[in-house]
Amino acid sequence: MRIAKHAAPTGSTSSLDPRLHAPPSAGGLPDKALRWSARVLVGVSWISGAIFALYIIGFFGGAALGGAGERWNESLPGLYDMAAPLATLAIGAHFAAGGVLLLLGPVQLITRVRQTVPGLHRGLGRTYVLSAGLAGLGGLVFIAGSGTIGGWVMDVGFGLYGVLMVLCAAMAYRHARARRYVLHRAWAIRLFALTIGSWLYRMEYGTWFMLTGGLGVGAGFSGVFDAVMAFFFYVPNLVLAELFIRARGQAGGAALRLGTAGLLAIASALVILVTWNFSAANWGPRMFSGMLEALR
Ligand code: HEM
Protein backbone atom coordinates (compact mmCIF):
# COMPACT_ATOMS: atom_id res chain seq x y z
CA MET A 1 0.00 0.00 0.00
CA ARG A 2 1.47 3.35 -1.01
CA ILE A 3 0.63 6.56 0.75
CA ALA A 4 0.30 9.33 -1.83
CA LYS A 5 -0.42 12.87 -0.70
CA HIS A 6 -2.43 13.97 -3.69
CA ALA A 7 -4.16 10.70 -4.52
CA ALA A 8 -7.81 11.08 -5.47
CA PRO A 9 -10.42 9.08 -3.59
CA THR A 10 -10.96 5.83 -5.42
CA GLY A 11 -14.24 4.01 -5.27
CA SER A 12 -15.36 5.99 -2.25
CA THR A 13 -18.74 4.97 -0.94
CA SER A 14 -18.60 7.56 1.82
CA SER A 15 -21.41 10.05 2.05
CA LEU A 16 -18.80 12.78 2.64
CA ASP A 17 -18.25 15.01 -0.37
CA PRO A 18 -14.69 14.26 -1.63
CA ARG A 19 -14.35 17.84 -2.94
CA LEU A 20 -14.26 18.94 0.68
CA HIS A 21 -11.24 16.78 1.33
CA ALA A 22 -9.22 17.25 -1.85
CA PRO A 23 -5.94 19.15 -1.28
CA PRO A 24 -5.84 22.76 -2.52
CA SER A 25 -3.78 23.89 -5.44
CA ALA A 26 -0.34 25.02 -4.28
CA GLY A 27 0.62 28.70 -4.11
CA GLY A 28 -1.15 31.92 -3.21
CA LEU A 29 -1.17 33.71 0.14
CA PRO A 30 -4.27 31.93 1.56
CA ASP A 31 -2.80 28.48 0.80
CA LYS A 32 0.59 29.38 2.23
CA ALA A 33 -0.97 30.89 5.35
CA LEU A 34 -3.11 27.77 5.86
CA ARG A 35 -0.18 25.41 5.31
CA TRP A 36 2.18 27.25 7.65
CA SER A 37 -0.35 27.86 10.41
CA ALA A 38 -1.16 24.12 10.36
CA ARG A 39 2.54 23.23 10.53
CA VAL A 40 3.14 25.55 13.48
CA LEU A 41 0.11 24.17 15.35
CA VAL A 42 1.20 20.55 14.77
CA GLY A 43 4.75 21.49 15.91
CA VAL A 44 3.72 23.20 19.15
CA SER A 45 1.12 20.46 19.82
CA TRP A 46 3.85 17.88 19.47
CA ILE A 47 6.16 19.60 21.98
CA SER A 48 3.29 20.17 24.41
CA GLY A 49 1.89 16.63 23.93
CA ALA A 50 5.38 15.16 24.39
CA ILE A 51 5.70 16.95 27.75
CA PHE A 52 2.35 15.43 28.80
CA ALA A 53 3.51 11.99 27.54
CA LEU A 54 6.73 12.31 29.59
CA TYR A 55 4.61 13.24 32.61
CA ILE A 56 2.46 10.12 32.05
CA ILE A 57 5.49 7.85 31.68
CA GLY A 58 7.37 9.49 34.57
CA PHE A 59 4.53 9.81 37.09
CA PHE A 60 2.07 6.95 36.31
CA GLY A 61 4.69 4.54 34.89
CA GLY A 62 7.24 5.38 37.59
CA ALA A 63 4.72 4.97 40.43
CA ALA A 64 3.50 1.60 39.02
CA LEU A 65 7.06 0.32 38.57
CA GLY A 66 7.96 1.43 42.08
CA GLY A 67 4.97 -0.53 43.49
CA ALA A 68 3.27 2.73 44.53
CA GLY A 69 0.23 2.55 42.20
CA GLU A 70 -1.94 4.23 44.84
CA ARG A 71 -0.05 7.44 44.06
CA TRP A 72 -2.09 7.62 40.80
CA ASN A 73 -4.91 8.85 43.04
CA GLU A 74 -2.94 12.02 43.78
CA SER A 75 -3.87 12.98 40.23
CA LEU A 76 -7.55 11.97 40.48
CA PRO A 77 -9.15 9.96 43.32
CA GLY A 78 -10.24 6.42 42.39
CA LEU A 79 -7.89 5.81 39.45
CA TYR A 80 -6.06 3.05 41.33
CA ASP A 81 -8.46 0.76 43.16
CA MET A 82 -7.44 -2.80 43.94
CA ALA A 83 -11.10 -3.60 44.70
CA ALA A 84 -11.78 -3.00 40.96
CA PRO A 85 -8.77 -4.67 39.26
CA LEU A 86 -10.25 -4.71 35.72
CA ALA A 87 -11.01 -0.98 35.77
CA THR A 88 -7.55 -0.24 37.23
CA LEU A 89 -5.87 -2.39 34.57
CA ALA A 90 -7.96 -0.75 31.82
CA ILE A 91 -7.09 2.80 32.94
CA GLY A 92 -3.39 1.79 33.21
CA ALA A 93 -3.44 0.39 29.63
CA HIS A 94 -5.18 3.59 28.51
CA PHE A 95 -2.37 5.69 30.07
CA ALA A 96 0.28 3.74 28.11
CA ALA A 97 -1.71 3.91 24.85
CA GLY A 98 -2.40 7.63 25.38
CA GLY A 99 1.35 8.30 25.79
CA VAL A 100 2.04 6.51 22.48
CA LEU A 101 -0.67 8.55 20.73
CA LEU A 102 0.77 11.86 21.92
CA LEU A 103 4.26 10.96 20.72
CA LEU A 104 3.35 9.40 17.36
CA GLY A 105 0.47 11.57 16.12
CA PRO A 106 2.43 14.50 14.67
CA VAL A 107 4.97 12.16 12.97
CA GLN A 108 2.11 10.71 10.97
CA LEU A 109 1.09 14.16 9.74
CA ILE A 110 4.52 15.08 8.31
CA THR A 111 4.19 14.91 4.51
CA ARG A 112 7.90 14.28 3.94
CA VAL A 113 7.85 11.21 6.19
CA ARG A 114 4.82 9.81 4.36
CA GLN A 115 6.41 10.37 0.98
CA THR A 116 10.00 9.31 1.66
CA VAL A 117 9.46 6.42 4.12
CA PRO A 118 5.92 5.13 3.47
CA GLY A 119 6.77 1.86 5.26
CA LEU A 120 7.43 3.80 8.47
CA HIS A 121 4.14 5.68 8.06
CA ARG A 122 2.27 2.38 7.67
CA GLY A 123 4.02 0.73 10.63
CA LEU A 124 3.52 3.70 12.95
CA GLY A 125 -0.02 4.08 11.59
CA ARG A 126 -0.97 0.57 12.74
CA THR A 127 0.53 1.27 16.19
CA TYR A 128 -1.33 4.59 16.30
CA VAL A 129 -4.69 3.05 15.37
CA LEU A 130 -4.21 0.22 17.91
CA SER A 131 -3.23 2.73 20.61
CA ALA A 132 -6.28 4.90 19.84
CA GLY A 133 -8.50 1.80 20.13
CA LEU A 134 -6.83 0.84 23.42
CA ALA A 135 -6.97 4.37 24.89
CA GLY A 136 -10.66 4.67 23.94
CA LEU A 137 -11.68 1.16 25.03
CA GLY A 138 -9.56 1.33 28.22
CA GLY A 139 -11.29 4.59 29.15
CA LEU A 140 -14.72 3.14 28.34
CA VAL A 141 -14.08 0.00 30.46
CA PHE A 142 -12.99 2.25 33.34
CA ILE A 143 -16.18 4.33 33.02
CA ALA A 144 -18.33 1.17 32.90
CA GLY A 145 -16.50 -0.37 35.90
CA SER A 146 -15.84 2.57 38.20
CA GLY A 147 -17.50 5.64 36.66
CA THR A 148 -15.76 9.00 36.39
CA ILE A 149 -15.24 11.26 39.36
CA GLY A 150 -17.73 13.80 37.94
CA GLY A 151 -20.82 11.55 37.71
CA TRP A 152 -23.14 11.02 34.76
CA VAL A 153 -22.40 14.26 32.83
CA MET A 154 -18.69 13.46 32.81
CA ASP A 155 -19.48 9.78 32.06
CA VAL A 156 -21.43 10.90 28.95
CA GLY A 157 -18.80 13.46 27.84
CA PHE A 158 -15.86 11.08 28.26
CA GLY A 159 -17.89 8.11 26.95
CA LEU A 160 -18.65 10.00 23.73
CA TYR A 161 -14.99 11.02 23.52
CA GLY A 162 -13.97 7.34 23.70
CA VAL A 163 -16.55 6.26 21.10
CA LEU A 164 -15.45 9.05 18.70
CA MET A 165 -11.80 8.13 19.15
CA VAL A 166 -12.45 4.46 18.33
CA LEU A 167 -14.65 5.51 15.34
CA CYS A 168 -12.04 7.92 13.88
CA ALA A 169 -9.26 5.33 14.30
CA ALA A 170 -11.37 2.63 12.59
CA MET A 171 -12.38 4.95 9.71
CA ALA A 172 -8.80 6.20 9.16
CA TYR A 173 -7.61 2.58 9.01
CA ARG A 174 -10.49 1.44 6.79
CA HIS A 175 -9.92 4.20 4.20
CA ALA A 176 -6.15 3.59 4.20
CA ARG A 177 -6.71 -0.13 3.54
CA ALA A 178 -9.10 0.74 0.70
CA ARG A 179 -6.59 3.29 -0.69
CA ARG A 180 -9.01 6.18 -0.32
CA TYR A 181 -6.19 8.40 0.85
CA VAL A 182 -7.97 11.73 0.85
CA LEU A 183 -10.70 10.39 3.12
CA HIS A 184 -8.06 8.54 5.16
CA ARG A 185 -6.27 11.85 5.75
CA ALA A 186 -9.48 13.61 6.76
CA TRP A 187 -10.27 10.93 9.40
CA ALA A 188 -6.64 10.95 10.59
CA ILE A 189 -6.87 14.74 11.11
CA ARG A 190 -10.09 14.26 13.14
CA LEU A 191 -8.33 11.57 15.21
CA PHE A 192 -5.36 13.86 15.86
CA ALA A 193 -7.73 16.66 16.93
CA LEU A 194 -9.32 14.26 19.42
CA THR A 195 -6.04 12.99 20.88
CA ILE A 196 -4.79 16.51 21.64
CA GLY A 197 -7.99 16.99 23.65
CA SER A 198 -6.55 14.70 26.36
CA TRP A 199 -3.94 17.27 27.41
CA LEU A 200 -5.97 20.33 26.44
CA TYR A 201 -8.44 19.21 29.12
CA ARG A 202 -5.82 19.50 31.85
CA MET A 203 -4.38 22.71 30.48
CA GLU A 204 -7.77 24.37 30.06
CA TYR A 205 -8.53 23.63 33.72
CA GLY A 206 -5.12 25.02 34.75
CA THR A 207 -5.67 28.19 32.74
CA TRP A 208 -9.23 28.63 34.06
CA PHE A 209 -7.96 28.38 37.65
CA MET A 210 -5.23 30.87 36.87
CA LEU A 211 -7.71 33.36 35.35
CA THR A 212 -10.75 32.97 37.62
CA GLY A 213 -9.57 31.09 40.69
CA GLY A 214 -11.88 28.17 39.76
CA LEU A 215 -15.21 29.88 39.00
CA GLY A 216 -17.92 27.25 38.36
CA VAL A 217 -15.70 24.35 39.47
CA GLY A 218 -17.58 22.22 42.01
CA ALA A 219 -16.46 19.62 44.54
CA GLY A 220 -16.02 16.29 42.73
CA PHE A 221 -16.26 18.01 39.32
CA SER A 222 -19.93 18.87 39.91
CA GLY A 223 -19.94 22.56 38.88
CA VAL A 224 -21.22 24.29 35.75
CA PHE A 225 -17.71 24.73 34.42
CA ASP A 226 -17.04 20.99 34.96
CA ALA A 227 -20.17 20.09 32.98
CA VAL A 228 -19.10 22.34 30.09
CA MET A 229 -15.57 20.94 30.21
CA ALA A 230 -16.82 17.35 29.91
CA PHE A 231 -17.35 18.20 26.20
CA PHE A 232 -15.36 21.38 25.61
CA PHE A 233 -11.94 19.69 25.48
CA TYR A 234 -12.70 17.89 22.22
CA VAL A 235 -15.74 19.49 20.49
CA PRO A 236 -13.95 22.79 19.52
CA ASN A 237 -10.93 20.78 18.28
CA LEU A 238 -13.21 18.72 16.06
CA VAL A 239 -14.86 21.89 14.72
CA LEU A 240 -11.45 23.40 13.94
CA ALA A 241 -10.34 20.13 12.29
CA GLU A 242 -13.51 20.14 10.19
CA LEU A 243 -12.88 23.77 9.14
CA PHE A 244 -9.31 22.86 8.21
CA ILE A 245 -10.42 19.85 6.14
CA ARG A 246 -12.94 22.01 4.27
CA ALA A 247 -10.60 25.01 3.85
CA ARG A 248 -7.91 22.70 2.46
CA GLY A 249 -10.32 21.11 0.02
CA GLN A 250 -11.26 22.56 -3.33
CA ALA A 251 -14.56 23.78 -1.87
CA GLY A 252 -12.64 26.17 0.41
CA GLY A 253 -12.37 29.77 -0.88
CA ALA A 254 -9.65 32.30 0.00
CA ALA A 255 -11.67 33.80 2.87
CA LEU A 256 -12.21 30.40 4.50
CA ARG A 257 -8.53 29.55 4.14
CA LEU A 258 -7.34 32.84 5.63
CA GLY A 259 -9.92 32.71 8.42
CA THR A 260 -8.97 29.13 9.32
CA ALA A 261 -5.26 30.04 9.20
CA GLY A 262 -5.96 32.88 11.67
CA LEU A 263 -7.80 30.52 14.04
CA LEU A 264 -4.97 27.97 13.85
CA ALA A 265 -2.43 30.73 14.67
CA ILE A 266 -4.47 31.84 17.71
CA ALA A 267 -4.72 28.18 18.83
CA SER A 268 -0.91 27.84 18.57
CA ALA A 269 -0.33 30.96 20.70
CA LEU A 270 -2.74 29.66 23.37
CA VAL A 271 -1.12 26.20 23.41
CA ILE A 272 2.33 27.77 23.94
CA LEU A 273 1.08 29.96 26.79
CA VAL A 274 -0.83 27.29 28.71
CA THR A 275 1.88 24.63 28.17
CA TRP A 276 4.44 26.91 29.76
CA ASN A 277 2.27 27.66 32.78
CA PHE A 278 1.09 24.11 33.31
CA SER A 279 4.49 22.42 32.89
CA ALA A 280 6.09 24.66 35.49
CA ALA A 281 3.25 24.36 38.02
CA ASN A 282 2.04 20.76 37.65
CA TRP A 283 3.49 18.23 35.20
CA GLY A 284 7.16 19.04 35.85
CA PRO A 285 7.21 18.55 39.66
CA ARG A 286 4.90 15.44 39.50
CA MET A 287 6.96 13.81 36.74
CA PHE A 288 10.14 14.02 38.81
CA SER A 289 8.49 12.74 41.99
CA GLY A 290 7.12 9.67 40.09
CA MET A 291 10.54 8.95 38.61
CA LEU A 292 12.12 9.17 42.08
CA GLU A 293 9.54 6.58 43.24
CA ALA A 294 10.80 4.11 40.57
CA LEU A 295 14.44 4.73 41.56
CA ARG A 296 13.89 4.14 45.31
C1 HEM B 1 -4.34 10.63 23.89
C2 HEM B 1 -5.24 9.99 24.58
C3 HEM B 1 -5.36 10.01 26.08
C4 HEM B 1 -4.44 10.33 27.05
C5 HEM B 1 -3.01 10.76 26.86
C6 HEM B 1 -5.10 10.20 28.34
C7 HEM B 1 -4.51 10.43 29.57
C8 HEM B 1 -5.13 10.33 30.79
C9 HEM B 1 -4.53 10.59 32.08
C10 HEM B 1 -3.07 10.98 32.29
C11 HEM B 1 -5.47 10.42 33.04
C12 HEM B 1 -5.27 10.55 34.58
C13 HEM B 1 -5.82 11.81 35.11
C14 HEM B 1 -4.89 12.98 34.96
O1 HEM B 1 -3.71 12.91 35.29
O2 HEM B 1 -5.37 14.03 34.52
C15 HEM B 1 -6.68 10.03 32.38
C16 HEM B 1 -7.89 9.75 33.00
C17 HEM B 1 -9.04 9.34 32.35
N1 HEM B 1 -9.22 9.21 30.99
FE1 HEM B 1 -7.83 9.49 29.55
N2 HEM B 1 -6.41 9.83 28.11
C18 HEM B 1 -6.60 9.69 26.76
C19 HEM B 1 -7.76 9.33 26.10
C20 HEM B 1 -8.95 9.00 26.73
C21 HEM B 1 -10.15 8.58 26.05
C22 HEM B 1 -10.31 8.43 24.54
C23 HEM B 1 -11.09 8.37 27.01
C24 HEM B 1 -12.51 7.97 26.76
C25 HEM B 1 -13.11 6.96 27.17
C26 HEM B 1 -10.47 8.63 28.30
C27 HEM B 1 -11.07 8.49 29.53
C28 HEM B 1 -10.49 8.75 30.76
C29 HEM B 1 -11.17 8.59 32.03
C30 HEM B 1 -12.62 8.14 32.21
C31 HEM B 1 -10.26 8.96 33.03
C32 HEM B 1 -10.50 8.96 34.54
C33 HEM B 1 -11.34 10.14 34.92
C34 HEM B 1 -11.94 9.97 36.32
O3 HEM B 1 -11.40 9.30 37.16
O4 HEM B 1 -12.97 10.55 36.55
N3 HEM B 1 -9.17 9.03 28.08
N4 HEM B 1 -6.46 9.99 31.01
Image (cartoon, helix red, strand yellow):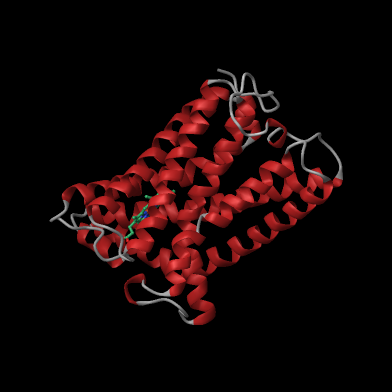
Which is more toward the observer, 8 or 16?
Answer: 16
Q: Quadrant of the N terminus?
A: top right
Q: Position of residue 172 (x, y in %)?
A: 52, 32
Q: Quadrant of the C terminus?
A: bottom left
Question: Can residue 262 be seen by looking at this rendering?
Answer: yes
The answer to whether residue 99 is left or right of residue 114 is left
- Relative to 99, does residue 127 appear above or below in the rendering? above
The answer to whether residue 247 is left or right of residue 166 is right
Q: Position of residue 126 (x, y in %)?
A: 45, 29
Q: Position of residue 185 (x, y in %)?
A: 60, 34
Which is more toward the observer, 182 or 61?
Answer: 182
Within the displayed image, which quadrant is ligand 1 positioned in?
Answer: bottom left
Q: Position of residue 275 (x, y in %)?
A: 53, 63
Question: Can residue 279 be seen by looking at this rendering?
Answer: no
Q: Which residue is pictured at 49% across the width and 65% down the height?
A: 203
* Quarter holding residue 270: bottom right
Q: Which residue is pictured at 49% across the width and 39% down the height?
A: 168
Q: Which residue is pictured at 51% across the width and 22% down the height?
A: 177
